[in-house]
Each structure stands twice: as structure tokens, then as C-alpha cells.
Image: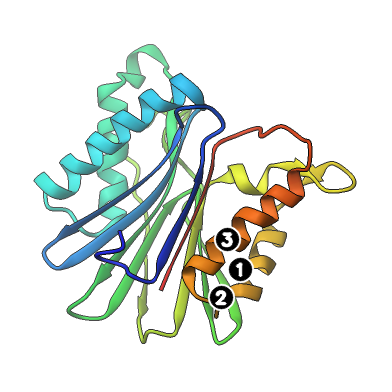
Amino acid sequence: IQKFLPESFVYFKPKDVISGDFYWLGEVDNKIIFGSFDCTGHGVPGAFMTLIGSDLMNLVTLVQKKTDPAEILTELHKQVVSQLRQDENKNQDGMDVAICTIDKTNNTLEFAGAKNTLIAIKNGELEEYKGDKFPIGGTQYQEDREFSKQTFQLDGSCSFYMFSDGYIDQFGGDEGRKFMRKQLKELCQTFASKPMPEQKEIIEQTMIDWMGNKSQIDDMLVIGFK
């Protein structure tokens, strides 16, 4: 990741030894594909889905050479439904995903999400770009599912963030409440101009302070890059 995106960090904290969250990066045709994945469950059940998800990302991008993030999500969904035979056995496993494709030739970033979002911060201003409202696989069994994408022109001044729900759903603080998306967005806004290693330290320490003596309830994944 540092080779392709020197200004980046990955905060990854599984609930158990193995995780239902994972991240994936690859390069196809001078385009960097970077994604965050939140699979159904955590521990062993979640980890089995990460193996399937990572393998399918290799297939769809490195073998099939798909780089459009919406097309990647559409094909991922078809493959998950097919490999888990969800139309036959009503298996409900799936993934919430955020994928960015960075085109180094045209200096653009394309984003597509399956329930997950992308935060972009430029000159202190924050925008949240929402993915589509359905996951990869899961409880909706239709075989065909079309995802949409959003495209950004890059000028080097924008920071981007992807995350699973483990961070924002964690209980803590004086009143034992969830951390919440709003607080994460505000946190990112305060440190977006700082070096990425420092941003990761803040993400980590903020959660340590927030949890106190509370137990971690889910895998956590926060990704930042410029």
C-alpha cells in the first residue's frame, strides 16, 4: 500500500484473532484499486467470508481486468450469490464494501459503494458520498444488482476515508453510547491536514480513550489516503 499510496494509513483492529473486515489493493492498467470490506459476522464465520471476498477480488480485477468500481461490485455480487448458492439455500452472508479506483493517467478517482460510504475532505470542507443501499450478497437474493459510481478530479489536496461500521458502532464514553458516524466525520475533519501516520495514531488513541473498560463489539477498519 505504501508503494502505491505513500500518503495513506490503515487502522485495522479485529475483534478476535481473525477478522470479518479486510482491505484489498491491486493495480490494473495503471489504475490503483483500493477497497474496504465488512463481511457478515466476525471471528471464524467472518474470516471465511474474507477468504471468499479476497479471492473474488483477485478474480474480478487481476484476471477479468475490471477496474470500474461499480462493475467490480456488480460482478462481486453475482459471484457471491453463485458461489454460496444463495438462490438455493437462502444463505444470508454478504459484504458491505467501499471501492476506489485511482486513475494515475487521467488523475481521477472513481468510487462505488455497497452500503458503505466515502468521506472526502478538501480545504477543511467535508463531503460524504454514499454508496448504494444494498450489500454484496446478503438477504436480497436477486442475481442482478447494478451499482452506481461517482467520479472526482484529483489535484492532490483532497483526503479520502473509508471505514467499516465497527468503529462507529463501538460503545464507550461517559454514557456508554455508540461512537457514531457524525463523531468520526468530525474527527477526520480536525486532522485531515496532518501527516497520515499521525492521523492513524489519533484514530487509534481516540478509540482507546472512547472504549475505556468496554469490550470491543466488532472488527474495526478505517482507511485514509491522499
Q: Report if the CB atoms under discs 3 and 2 are less than 8 Å apart.
A: no
- Label 3: element kind: helix
Residue in the image at 37% along x and 12% along y = 89
Direction from residue 221 to residue 179 in the image, left or right = right
Label 2 element class: loop
Instruction: Tell me the quarter of the picture where residue 144 sits.
Output: top left
> Which residue lies at the image location 61% right of the left edge and 74% below the top edge?
191
Horizontally, residue 37 falls left or right of residue 173, namely: left
Query: x%, y% of residue 158?
Result: 45, 80
Q: Is residue 50 left or right of residue 208?
A: left
Q: Residue furthest right?
A: 175
Which color scheme does this rendered protein use?
A: rainbow
Residue pointed to by mark 2:
192
Res. 28 visible in picture: yes
208, 24: nearer the viewer: 208
Labels 2 & 1 near each other (Cβ < 8 A): yes
Q: How much space separates mark 3 and mark 2, taking CA atoms?
A: 13 Å
**Three-letter code, disc 2:** Ala
Check disc 1 and report the residue beneath it: 188
Residue denoted by label 3: 201
